[in-house]
Image (spheres, rainbow, N blue to C red):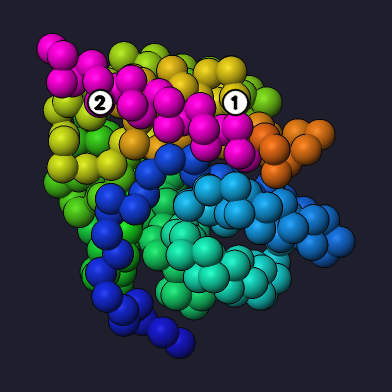
Amino acid sequence: MATSIASNAVDPNHLAGVYLLTPDSDDAGFEQVLMIVEQALQAGVRVIQYREKKAAITTQFGRAERLRELTRLADALLIINDSVELAIHCHADGVHLGRSDGEVGAARERLHNSLIGVSCYNELALARSALAAGADAIAFGSIYSSATKPSAVHAPLALVTEARTTWPQCRVIAIGGINVSNISDVAAAGAHAAAVLDAVFTAHDPAQAASKLVQQFEQGRRNYENQRTTV
């Protein structure tokens, strides 16, 4: 069994833009997931997070490997939700840890060259601790009401801006209820990346939805940069 990822260090700056999370699915549904992920990558999405809660671990291993193939072809990042072991197995670019997914320091010992993101909900104190332990990215949310996690705590956009200003050396991710109507605001608030799921996977035309999200995020990013240069 592998104990660490042996590869060149992943550049945290590549963690940017539309950050697409995958949904739970059965075997037939996962084929659809793969098709939509491929369309999203073609539309300009450069970060995919494999996030699945219900499948058996052996199934997750196989699915993560297939996603790894797609992201390599597109020169995109693959981030694994929750599992350091799964990230190691499929040579992912990183892992994202929630509150109950283990210590950042322990993950860093095994993922020397990979990205580590941490869910910080609406707490700057969690972000401070995660960064001190070696995290590369901090995620705040839910920014807006989310059908995926309807009971999630609310994190205002001002928190994203404060985190970006306080820790300019790390990547700031926004998550929760983000769609084409508000992703520009998220980027304009300073988020390096905006995590979405339903905005692509439940869209009538996922490829078009992904393309619009990429365009709107870029517009907001430019607005953020313009604000910084005029202040």
**Front residue of this view, candidates 223 and 110:** 223
Left or right side of 77 for 54: right
Quadrant of the rendering where the N terminus is positioned: bottom left
Left or right side of 41 for 170: left
Crowding near pointer 2: few (<14 within 10 Å), some, many (20+)? Answer: few
The reply to whether residue 142 is visible in this rendering is no
Left or right side of 127 for 38: right
Q: Please state the horizontal and vertical placement of residue 53, each as a whole percent of the image.
A: 64, 52
Is 181 included in the stretch rendered in magenta? no
Q: Dot 1 lies on which element?
A: loop
Query: Residue 179, labelled with which disc?
Result: 1
Looking at the rendered structure, the kind of residue marked 1 is Asn
For the point 52% across and 37% down, the residue is 214
Residue 104 vertical placement versus 21 (above, below) = below
Residue 146 vertical placement versus 61 (above, below) = above
* Residue named by callout 2: 225
> What number of labels is visible?
2
For the point 59% across and 18% down, the residue is 181
In the rendered image, the residue lying farthest to the bottom is 1
Left or right side of 209 for 8: left
For the point 36% across and 81% down, the residue is 3
For the point 22% across and 43% down, the residue is 170
Crowding near pointer 1: few (<14 within 10 Å), some, many (20+)? Answer: many
Alpha carbon of mark 2 to alpha carbon of mark 1: how far? 21 Å
- In the image, which residues are magenta? 210-231
